[in-house]
Amino acid sequence: MPLFVMIGHDAPDSKEKRPRHRPDHLAHLEPLAADGRVPLAGPFTDGSGSLIVLEADSLADAWAIVSRDPFVVNGIYNRVELKPFLKVFPTSQ
């Protein structure tokens, strides 16, 4: 399944809003992670946003998943980038 990288850029007021929506954000990601579709996710330590690596059938499918994320819906991210990604390292065996 293709990989995509989502970079969510935090809105100016995200620090105040993030704790309120974090449980729903994690609940959105947990079933995807359990299915192996989110191998990596987390915030940038400089407070500028977050990164999520996501497996999806297509770019449209990845956007559908990202658009339902509570951090997107509730404006924690004021801008989202979603790019196809090719993992080359470490190599699969």
Image (cartoon, rainbow, N blue to C red):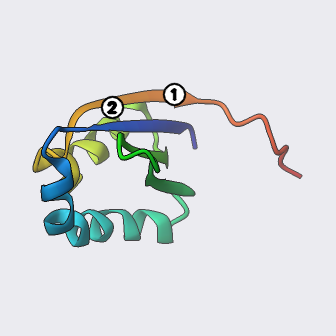
**Could you tell me if residue 68 is visible in this image?**
no
Residue 91 screen position, x and y as percent: 85, 43
Q: Quadrant of residue 24?
A: bottom left
- Name the residue rendered at 46%, 50% in the picture: 45
**Mark 1 and mark 2: Cα distance apart in space:** 11 Å
Q: Which is nearer the eye, 48 or 51? A: 48
- Name the residue rendered at 36%, 63% in the picture: 29
Q: Nearer the viewer, mark 1 or mark 2?
A: 1
6 to the left or right of 22 = right
Q: Residue furthest front?
A: 46
Q: Residues within 10 Å of mark 2 (few under 14, many from 20)?
A: few
Q: Quadrant of the N terminus?
A: top right
Residue 36 screen position, x and y as percent: 55, 63
47 to the left or right of 88 = left
The amino acid type found where label 2 is placed reads Ala
Residue 23 screen position, x and y as percent: 24, 72
Q: Residues within 10 Å of mark 1 (few under 14, many from 20)?
A: some
The residue that mark 2 highlights is 60
- Name the residue rendered at 16%, 38% in the picture: 12
The residue that mark 1 highlights is 84
The amino acid type found where label 1 is placed reads Pro
Query: Does residue 35 sit above or below 54 in this rendering?
Result: below
Query: Does residue 46 sit above or below 15 in this rendering?
Result: above
- Name the residue rendered at 89%, 52% in the picture: 93
Q: Which is nearer the eye, 9 or 53? A: 9
Query: Does residue 11 sit above or below 23 in this rendering?
Result: above
